[in-house]
């Protein structure tokens, strides 16, 4: 059985990205063979297609950290031909061929039945970005966040994680503020639930003060760097910051004072190796109370394999709004 896939390979000191015709013999080891219907493009996928991204661990590689589709065959009793399934995270797309392909073979322990309330298209409109947003919301809830405690700030709010988090929080009844560097997208943010919008500069400005006025009940932060430092200084007593990204940098200039004087909680969010029971529980909520309203219409943009490289370059440049779906089959 032949299939099309994007392949990233070493080429001198750089990489080459091409759409190739592959055969079933090119599939890796794994118990579950999947006809991929939809994938999605995340920031990590942008890094995978960048010569300086350094996330792919072996070449050649089929990138794409997300996929959803139908089981064609399974050597594992948990799955049968015809089952609808979702795969996100683990080594998919970086060390194990991933979702930018019409066919995939995946270890059974990485495969999850499609949650009730979601189609394969909706699952990929959420994907790793939506899962990260949902993990962030749940982490803040477990830290004690309630809608009556004040405004929740979402940084990078026009990106995949940020826009989905704004939508999820708003429909749960929270007052949501969003920060963005895109002045043209304020209407988009208001449409998905933000009631206040801040500039990127407002939330990344340097300060010599270890703490500022208590402004935010909590924050979802897929940006990192100086933005995380601002949040640590300005979150209210006992508030949580769900940190999941590094687009704004990997160094956080801060002091111990917000932690020991205000009880601020920095909550690390890992969507890649999240344990399966937690993964299944959160994905179940993503088909219910954490399913964004108007998921397909308000967030997702569609492309095909031929458009993936362009979108991956644009996502690293901060030009992509919301989520981008990759259409592979039906």
Image (cartoon, rainbow, N blue to C red):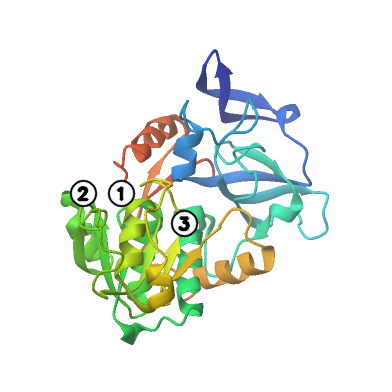
Left or right: 195, with 229 as reference point: left
The CA distance from mark 1 to mark 2 is 9 Å
Residue 117 pos. (x, y %) = 52, 69
The answer to the question of whether label 1 and label 2 lie on touching residues, with beta carbons closer than 8 A, is: yes
Residue reaching furthest to the top: 12
Q: Residue at x 46, y 55 (%)?
A: 129
Task: Note whether 82 is above or below 320 in the view shown.
Answer: below
Determine the secondary structure under disc 1.
loop
Please state which of residues 145 and 38 is positioned toward the viewer in this rendering.
145
Q: Quadrant of the N terminus?
A: top right
Task: Note whether 190 is above or below 65 in the view shown.
Answer: below
- Closer mark to the observer between disc 1 and disc 2: 2
- Closer mark to the observer between disc 2 and disc 3: 3
Q: Residue at x 37, y 31 (%)?
A: 310
Residue 115 pos. (x, y %) = 59, 66
Left or right: 244, with 80 as reference point: left
- Residue under label 2, please give it: 182
The CA distance from mark 2 to mark 3 is 21 Å
Residue 21 pos. (x, y %) = 60, 23
Q: How many marks?
A: 3
Q: Specify whether residue 293 is in view.
A: no
Determine the secondary structure under disc 3.
loop
Please state which of residues 117 and 178 is positioned toward the viewer in this rendering.
178
Residue 322 pos. (x, y %) = 34, 52
Quick one: label 1 or label 2, which is nearer the N terminus?
2
Local crowd at mark 3 within 10 Å, few (<14), some, or many (≥20)? many
- Residue under label 3, please give it: 244
Quadrant assignment, res 76: bottom right
- Residue under label 1, please give it: 321
């Amino acid at each position: 059985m032949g299939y099309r896939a994007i392949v990233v390979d070493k080429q001198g000191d750089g990489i080459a990205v091409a759409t190739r015709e592959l055969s079933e013999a090119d599939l890796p080891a794994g118990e579950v063979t999947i006809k991929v219907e939809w994938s999605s493009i995340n920031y990590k996928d942008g890094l995978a297609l960048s010569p300086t991204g350094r996330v792919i661990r072996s070449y050649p590689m089929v990138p794409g950290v997300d996929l959803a589709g139908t089981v064609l065959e399974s050597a594992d009793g948990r799955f049968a031909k015809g089952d609808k399934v979702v795969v996100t995270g683990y080594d998919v797309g970086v060390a194990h061929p991933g979702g930018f392909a019409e066919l995939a073979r995946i270890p059974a322990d990485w495969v999850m039945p499609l949650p009730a309330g979601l189609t394969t298209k909706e699952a990929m409109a959420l994907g790793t970005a939506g899962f990260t947003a949902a993990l962030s919301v749940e982490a803040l809830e477990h830290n004690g966040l309630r809608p009556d405690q004040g405004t929740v700030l979402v940084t990078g709010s026009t990106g995949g994680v940020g826009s989905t988090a704004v939508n999820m929080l708003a429909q749960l009844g929270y007052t949501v503020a969003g920060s963005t560097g895109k002045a043209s997208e304020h209407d988009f943010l208001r449409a998905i639930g933000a009631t206040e919008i801040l500039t990127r500069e407002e939330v990344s400005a340097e300060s010599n003060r270890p703490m500022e006025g208590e402004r935010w009940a909590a924050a979802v932060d897929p940006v990192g760097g100086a933005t995380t430092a601002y949040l640590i200084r300005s979150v209210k007593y006992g508030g949580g910051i769900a940190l999941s990204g590094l687009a704004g940098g990997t160094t956080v200039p801060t002091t111990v004072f917000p932690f020991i004087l205000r009880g601020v909680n920095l909550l690390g969010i890992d969507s890649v190796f999240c344990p399966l029971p937690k993964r299944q529980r959160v994905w179940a909520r993503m088909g219910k109370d954490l399913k964004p309203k108007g998921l397909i219409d308000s967030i997702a943009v569609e492309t095909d394999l031929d458009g993936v490289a362009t979108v991956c370059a644009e996502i690293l440049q901060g030009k992509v709004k919301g989520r981008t779906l990759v259409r592979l089959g039906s």
